[in-house]
Image (tube, helix red, strand yellow):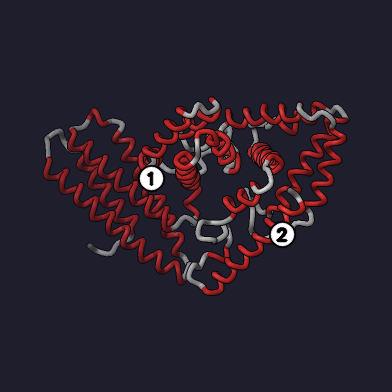
Amino acid sequence: MELLKIEDLLNSLWQEIELYLSESEELNLQKANSLRKKTNVVIEEAERQLSYTLIELGHNHNGKGHRVDAVMEQAIALSLKADTHLSKAHLYHPYRTELLECFLASLDRLMLNIRSKFSHLQYAKLSPPLHYVGYIQAMEINKVEYIIKTIQEANLHAIIVSSLQDYFVNPMPSNHSSRTPNDGFSSLDYFVGLVESLYEICRKTSTFELEEAIYYELINRNFNRVQFIRALVSYYRKILDKVEDPIDEIGRLFVMQKEISKIPVISGMAYIHSDAGLKEFVLRAISIEIRFLKNMIKHREQEVAYLIGPTFSTQRNIVQFLMMFNALFNLSFLRRTGKGSLPQFIRQNFIRANGETFSLGSLQKKNSVTDRKNAQGLVEMLSKMIEYITRNYL
């Protein structure tokens, strides 16, 4: 095949398909089959060229990223056009409908290929076409059905079940979201990651512990469906109501704050996706709770209600609320864990099965001797921190 730009290859193919669709009603199975075969050839050539681009990007970023962005934009535009034709499928013979389905499925595979290889480029914020969203959902459908079946059989809280069901039907962010509407391909990455995580939790967690495990997973992934957020607001109000003596509670929190401030900091370690380490994360949670309790003492009910009642009209307010609740919820978890539980909790959330730590840029080059030493050093530091917490805090 002549070496043309991928956008030109796709555009030329679509022009042939459009011409075929506009032809008379006379059946032409041979032409339809020919176009299906050509579709496969063009997509294979596009993926081959993208593989070369990936290699080039590894050595020289000059201009190459823009080329991939252009390919993705072209694939999105053609998918939308083809989907529009498919919505009029009743006007076409099945041969033509099958051709459109073949073309759309091929574009879906191409976009997934691009997404897996070039996730860092600008196109990530573009809105994926609906057909591609359905393609990703179909890939995860078996795991989604397993998750829903498991949580229903376990009689989990209705808010969790309904929120997840709503989310799995439409994983793209709504207007009432901490993400901007149609947050692009990264929202589908979030969807796949959440499905994979919940699937493993449902497979490996006992029915007795399942609700708590899923609850923490949703909170720590900043799961942002409106009904779930409102349930958290209601839950936190109940926590505040249980505080019998705010002054004593503040005193206890100040002591805890002083003790935790002595815990060594490990750079890059964070239970939530933020820039804070474990120590800063917990200290911030304590500071927020102290502020709440002081407001309770002063009977500033309106201010307390403002702090725990998110305004859904702005992105910033919801992000702040989710981060705040995340911290508060995990602080209450740290309190409730008994001696021996906290070290296990930290190990489960900070250490991989093979001993590597999570979220560390120094571990990107897996085969580096230096990185292996860094990983070992971090594991040793974490062990020391666990010992310190167990000895001085539990």
Q: Nearer the viewer, residue 155 or 167?
A: 155
Image quadrant in which the N terminus is located: bottom left
Tell me the crowding category of disc 2: few under 14, some 14 to 19, or many 20 or more residues within 10 angstroms, Cα based: some
**What's the residue type where badge 1 is placed?**
Ala
Task: Return the x and y of residue 319 as percentages of the image width and height.
Answer: 65, 41
- Residue appearing at x 44%, y 66% in the figure: 57
Instruction: Identify which residue, 368 or 176, lies in the foreground.
Output: 368
Residue 352 appears left or right of 307? left
Question: Which label belongs to residue 77?
Answer: 1
Asked if disc 2 and disc 1 are in contact, CB closer than 8 Å, the reply is no
Q: Tell me the SS state at disc 2.
A: loop
The residue mark sitting in front, 2 or 1, is: 2
Give the residue displayed 50% in from the left and 60% down from the top. 354
Q: CA distance from mark 2 to mark 1?
A: 48 Å
Task: Give left or right: position of 63 versus 359.
Answer: left
Residue 265, numbered label: 2
